[in-house]
Image (spheres, rainbow, N blue to C red):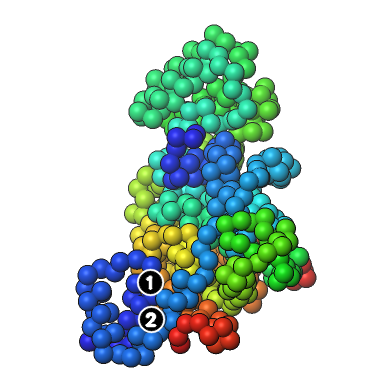
Amino acid sequence: MKALGDTALALALKEGDEAAFDEIVRRYQGRVYATAYRVTGNREDALDVAQEALLKAYRKIGSWQPTGPFLAWLLRLTVNQGIDHLRRGKRNQHEPLDETFVPGQEDAAVTPATVATDEAVRAREIDEKVRACLSVLSPAQRTVFMLRHYEGFQLAEIAEELGCTVGSVKVHLFRALKKLRVELEDFYRDSGVGGG
Amino acid sequence: MKGCRQIRGMLAASLYEALPENEADMLERHLAVCTACRAEQAALRQLAEDIPAEPAVFQGDLLPALREQRRQATRPRVRLAWLAPASVFAVAALALVVFLPGLHQPSGNTEITGQDTPSPLARTLDHAAALETDGDLTAARHAIETALASAPEDTHAGEAWLALARVQYGLGHYEEALAAYETTRADHPEAWRTSTPGAKLRFDLLADTRDEGFAPLVTLERARRKGAGAFDELEHIVARRPESMVANEALATMCAAVRASAVEGSTVEGSAVALLEEVRERCSDPTALARVDLEMGHAYWRDLDDPVRAREHFTLAAEAGNEALAGLAHQALAALEKPAR
């Protein structure tokens, strides 16, 4: 099972192979968690969302089409699950700013740090503002932005996943970035960084 | 030269990956003369660089909790929405993957899990799976039957009966396939409990059509092999007994055929409804149309959270004159009025 590629693994699950699901969880739970964390912004919610998303993938595997990348489908599902989770209002609270969020060190979000560098504080502010803005993006804009910016999917792969043209994906990406830039306008003005 | 609106997508894409040569030239020429777009590009680049992209690190293991949740939950049956909360996509997708080769997918020892002890029968099953993959179903059937006869109490006997049923189904020996599934259910309940949705669906289809000598199933499988060209035959199956399992699968196959021939560009969010709309366009029988309406009602309700459109389609299904469908449509309408789903 470990030797199977993503598509073969997903097809095996689609045919009902339980062992395939176990391998999918082992292989992708880190990616799913990271995506969930990006949307929710805290460890507890991210764990809930990751678990819900993987379970949903298990139940909804029939709707995955092998024409698109399985991981993109799984992460899109995770993003939507995270947004739903926030909308349901479960523990939707941001950590106080004196807890330094250091990207790449997820525990930092729940373990208060004693020293917060300017750079870390600034990264955290941007991260929080982006997270707050995710829910105002359209589902397509959000998916394109998350998969391209955070997950590094090629625009052509995202087009396959969304079932649309690459040109549409580019437009979604532009609109997502534009909205985020508008949301961050005050931040950039106050910090005196960047043009526009 | 392209205007500002036309180059925006390229502008965003260029922040992340190399553009095709013609687009790169187009963008460069535009930026050379457009101050506003140059400023836009700089602002978006700053933003893209500022948003942290490093992933949060996860060091736990969600598998034990997920296993427990799966154990407690019943996996959704592979049916259309009015029978179970599975979207038409789920069924259509399964139809594409499982059914087009005739509802027959060799899967080796994956029909059930949790029986890892090697045994002679397990080795035979591996061999039979290889034969299935090669398309030699007759040899696969012979191997499984011989092995089962010599080791009926083997720990993999339940799995072997499931494999035998699958092979018989693939051969079109529906009576024998049904008998093998019934043996599994009666003598190997644990194997049956953990069998795949595909196995359970095959059994349901066999049981559903037994009283008619499996004739609807023969028609369905023949239509599946013909693909989109068999749309009329599939519609006839749906219209003849729209509430049946075999009609469900016929409709799923119609959806799969439409999807396979769909023009690129529809959005994922809207495509379940779009798919059913297309199927509806191609149907002419009033009962088949009502069956599609019932499914569209569920698509609007469950997938798009649009109770108004869902109500419209449920009402159309209820008024179409088919008693069985009307009953299901009224049930759906009643459920729609409940405050929480």
**Residue that appears at 26% across and 74% down:** B23
Q: Nearer the viewer, residue B218 or B281?
A: B281
Q: Nearer the viewer, residue A192 or B107?
A: A192
The residue wearing badge 1 is B15
**Residue that appears at 35% across and 85% down:** B38
Mark 1: few/some/many CA within 10 Å (<14, 14-19, 20+)? some
Q: CA distance from mark 1 to mark 2?
A: 8 Å
Residue A87 position by quadrant: bottom right
**Residue that appears at 23% across and 83% down:** B29
Residue A41 at x, y percent in the picture: 65, 65
B243 up-or-down from B335: above or below: above
Q: In the figure, is residue B31 to the left or right of A64? A: left
Dot 2 falls on a residue whose secondary structure is: helix
Q: Is residue B177 visible from the viewing direction of this image?
A: no
Circle 1: residue type = Leu
Residue A114 at x, y percent in the picture: 71, 62
Chain for numbered disc 2: B
Residue occupying the far top of the picture: B150
Q: Is residue A132 visible from the viewing direction of this image?
A: yes
Q: In the figure, is residue A177 to the left or right of B226? A: right
A8 up-or-down from B335: above or below: above
Q: Earlier in the sequence, mark 1 or mark 2?
A: 1
The residue wearing badge 2 is B41
Residue B288 at x, y percent in the picture: 51, 61
The answer to whether the residues at label 1 and label 2 have Cβ atoms under 8 Å apart is: yes
**Residue that appears at 49% across and 45% down:** A10
- How many marks the image carries: the answer is 2
A87 up-or-down from B79: above or below: below
